[in-house]
Image: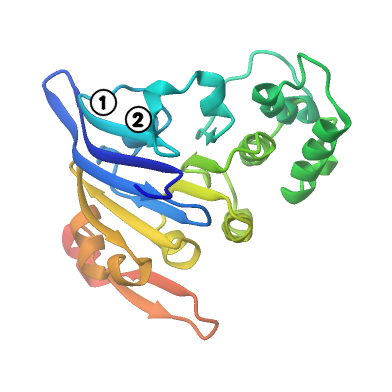
Amino acid sequence: MNGSLLAASALHFSYGNRPVLQGMDLEVHAGEVLALLGANGSGKSTLMRLLLGLLKPAAGVVSLEGRPMTRWSRREIACRVAYVPQSQHVPFPYRVREFVALGRIPRGGLFGRMSRHDQQVVEKALERLAIGHLAERIFTQLSGGQRQLCLIARALVQEAPVIVMDEPDTGLDYGNQWRLISLVRELSREGWAFILSTHHPEHALNGATRALLLHAGRMVANGDPAKVVSAAHIDRLYGLRVNCHKLADGQVVLIPDTEACASYA
């Protein structure tokens, strides 16, 4: 775990008598984009909750900056790990700028006094997510995709070195999905670390520095996306045969084998 921002060692977790994760190990370092791939029920969301300290493992340890997660306060954790959920119920009619500013709470902003620096951080996040034009709109009146961009902006303003994203492309149109992947890579080059789950293997192939594949609560592979996001692994994870194609610009796409798909029907 030397030098890792966030790490897990021999994690086990069960819901009652049903094992969900078995012997999970991982490390995330500054500048990495770790993509989690796996079918529904493979353990991705449970792993993320464990890494956020929201669940307690049955066995094993989650460490933050080399120290067990249990030794950090919730505020200390929030200053080091930000979370982007798939969606969030917001009962209060915040304006977008106010909602994004909630990410400053662990840093002492908002309910204290928003400093000029706090305000600058919020405005920069709105600009980076290209949602500055929505700043005065009511969050609950936005589309699902627009709300998702606001959730990501809120995580950015926490200025935590690690951002955990649970299917951050939820509700985003095709263009915004790839703009988000591009932004994640840009931020990773600035030193941020990302852990994101996705149902799009192409996002891992073209946007992640590392991919971790989960199947039935166990790690199938963990490494260079170009090597581990293979047709054989896609078949194992999702029961779907695909063909890998590299486009002229270097982007890799996965195309389902239509004849094989027809045979499943």
Residue placed furthest toward the left: 17
Could you classify mark 2 by the number of other residues whose Cα lies within 10 Å: few (under 14), some (14-19), or many (20 or more)? Answer: some
Image marks 2 and 1: residues in contact by CB distance under 8 Å: yes
213 over 122 or under it: above or below: below
Lateral position of residue 179 relative to residue 206, left or right: right
Q: Secondary structure at mark 1?
A: loop
**CA distance for labels 2 and 1:** 7 Å
Mark linked to residue 50: 2
90 over 81 or under it: above or below: above
Location of residue 264 (image quadrant) = bottom left
User: Which amino acid type is marked by label 1?
Assistant: Pro
Rendering coords of residue 80 (x, y %) = 55, 34
Location of residue 259 (image quadrant) = bottom left
Lateral position of residue 170 relative to residue 41, left or right: right
Rendering coords of residue 265 (x, y %) = 20, 56
Residue at left offset 65%, top offset 40%: 156
119 over 233 or under it: above or below: above
User: Which amino acid type is marked by label 2?
Assistant: Leu
Lateral position of residue 142 relative to residue 263, left or right: right
Rendering coords of residue 51 (x, y %) = 38, 34
Of residue 114 and residue 134, the one placed in the foreground of this image is: 114
Rendering coords of residue 32 (x, y %) = 48, 56
Residue 216 showing in the rendered view: yes
Residue denoted by label 1: 57
